[in-house]
Image (tube, rainbow, N blue to C red):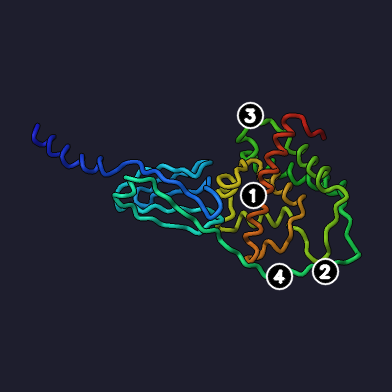
């Protein structure tokens, strides 16, 4: 019996010694990079780089690490013994996106946005959505926010006296909702994990984005990088907007 236990220990000991945390730092041509996803394909685990670009992940010799971010080219690295002796240095290259020229024609005729009419329709729409999807509006009771009140406030603050161009229409709520329902990349997982928007705030976030009059041509595949940049920018502003609303800095 004892000999069997010793044999098992001798078999398992090398496996334990070969698996340990490996550390490194990720940067590009300008600075160190945070929030870069580091995945160990061999062990099926993942982590993210911190504000200083540092990461630490469990690995063994011959494991494959993948370094990934939306705006950088993916990089794979096979782990060697030397990688455990020194800190890994990983350099990522930015994705360069060359876009076709977009021509915008200026017309004197402009369609005036009716804020009062839109507010009425919006209240009906969100009320109906709450009725049809109550589970989405009950996942974060600690916030205690008035969804309809916030939606009306978005209209007052961002859409009042704004106009819509006749030639290039801005992206609207229905287009965003359709995109996040059908696209393989832009979906609810991307909304929660990358944009950091709770799922229950999805309708409000789409309303907020519509209020920013994002260029409709960003929905074209050739302009996808522009759309991503806009979504990240507006997600940060939206979270600040909600925070200010909770603290009473914004009044209806």
Element assignment for label 3: loop
Among numbered discs 2 and 1, the one appearing first in the sequence = 2
Q: Nearer the viewer, mark 2 or mark 4?
A: 4
Q: Give residue 92's position: percent from left, percent from top.
A: 49, 56
Among numbered discs 3 and 4, the one appearing first in the sequence = 4
Badge 2: how crowded within 10 Å, few (<14), some, or many (20+)? few
Position of 213 with respect to 50 (left or right) is: right
Q: Which residue is mark 4?
A: 101
Q: Nearer the viewer, mark 1 or mark 4?
A: 4
Among numbered discs 1 and 3, the one appearing first in the sequence = 3
Among numbered discs 2 and 3, the one appearing first in the sequence = 2
Identify the residue at image location x=82%, y=43%: 157
Q: Which residue is mark 3?
A: 142
Among numbered discs 1 and 4, the one appearing first in the sequence = 4
Q: Give residue 97's position: percent from left, percent from top.
A: 60, 64
Badge 1: how crowded within 10 Å, few (<14), some, or many (20+)? some
Identify the residue at image location x=81%, y=33%: 251
Q: CA distance from mark 2 to mark 4?
A: 13 Å
Whether 214 is drawn above or below 149: the answer is: below
Q: Which mark is residue 232?
A: 1
Identify the residue at image location x=63%, y=29%: 142
Q: CA distance from mark 3 to mark 4?
A: 47 Å
Q: CA distance from mark 2 to mark 3?
A: 47 Å
**Callout 3–callout 4 Cβ contact below 8 Å:** no
Q: Which mark is residue 105?
A: 2
């Amino acid at each position: 019996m004892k000999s069997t236990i010793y044999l098992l220990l001798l078999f398992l000991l090398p496996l334990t010694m070969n698996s340990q945390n490996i550390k490194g730092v990720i940067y590009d041509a300008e600075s160190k990079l945070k929030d870069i996803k580091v995945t160990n394909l061999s062990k099926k685990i993942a982590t993210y780089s911190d504000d200083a670009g540092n990461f630490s992940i469990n690995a063994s010799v011959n494991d494959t690490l993948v370094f990934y971010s939306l705006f950088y080219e993916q990089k794979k690295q096979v782990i060697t013994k030397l990688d455990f002796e020194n800190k890994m240095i990983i350099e990522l290259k930015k994705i360069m996106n060359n876009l076709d020229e977009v021509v915008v024609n200026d017309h004197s005729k402009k369609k005036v946005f009716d804020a009062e009419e839109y507010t009425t329709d919006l209240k009906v729409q969100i009320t109906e959505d709450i009725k049809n999807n109550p589970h989405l509006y009950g996942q974060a009771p600690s916030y205690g926010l008035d969804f309809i009140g916030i939606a009306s406030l978005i209209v007052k603050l961002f859409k009042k006296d704004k106009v819509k161009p006749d030639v290039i229409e801005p992206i609207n709520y229905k287009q965003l909702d359709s995109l996040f329902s059908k696209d393989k990349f832009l979906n609810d997982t991307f909304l929660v994990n990358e944009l950091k928007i709770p799922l229950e705030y999805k309708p409000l976030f789409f309303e907020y984005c519509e209020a920013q009059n994002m260029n409709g041509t960003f929905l074209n595949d050739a302009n996808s990088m522009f759309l991503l940049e806009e979504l990240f920018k507006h997600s940060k502003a939206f979270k600040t907007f909600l925070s200010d609303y909770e603290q009473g800095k914004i009044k209806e």
